[in-house]
Amino acid sequence: MTRYWLTTHWPHPLDQSIDWDVFLQDKMRDPTREPEPGDRVLFYELLTGKQEVGKAKRPKGRRGIVCIASVAERLQERIGVAVEHYTDGTSGFWRWQAKCTDHDWAGFVPWQDVNAILEYSAKFSMLGFGGGSGLLSITADKFNRLVSVFQSTPRE
């Protein structure tokens, strides 16, 4: 049975060296709620994100849903590349990755529409989304409503 997900991403480097897949920090993995192959996922790009030490500055994010994709693989452990160190002195252990395919970049859902459809406060910034994991299962109805807006709003 297909499940539907919304995941957040920090703005990607301009060279697109980070894949548009589902990533989870080690401490956020919950085997009872994980995307499976065939599930559908919406990618929400946050306005900002933590800055990695020694990496180019992140661009400003688009603050909305920028992509729809299909989950291709179960969560897999990322070996040797999962720990990131940030300029604020913190670190993130992005141990888990579920590869995605069939990315659709044609549309966009502004953050105000995302908040309205998900029934969040109009001012919610998506920081801390999904209990801090950046991943949340959503209903088919909400997924389809977001897809409808995505398909009717051309990407800028």
Image (cartoon, rainbow, N blue to C red):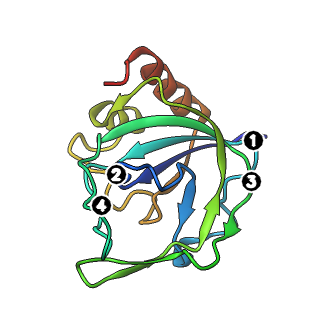
Estimate the x, y position of residue 155 in percent, counting from the top left: 37, 24
> Any mark on residue 91, and which?
none
Which sits in the foreground, 119 or 98?
Answer: 98
When the figure is inspected, residue 112 is found, relative to residue 82, above or below; the finding is: above
Q: Are marks 4 and 2 in contact (CB under 8 Å)?
A: yes
Query: Which residue position is annotated with label 3?
Result: 73
Decide which of tag 1 and tag 2 comes sooner along the chain: 2
Of mark 3 and mark 2, the one earlier in the sequence is 2
The outermost residue toward the bottom is 89
4 vs 1, front mark: 4
Judged by depth in the image, the label closer to the viewer, 3 or 1, is: 3
Question: What residue type is disc 4 on?
Answer: Gly
Outermost top residue: 152
Secondary structure category for the residue under label 1: loop
User: What x and y, as percent, mark residue 102?
Assistant: 65, 34
Nearest to N terminus: mark 3 or mark 1:
1
CB atoms of marks 3 and 1 within 8 Å: no
Mark 3 to mark 1: distance in Å?
A: 8 Å
Circle on res. 38: 1
Q: Give the mark, 4 or 3, whose residue is nearer the N terminus.
A: 4
Mark 3 secondary-structure assignment: loop
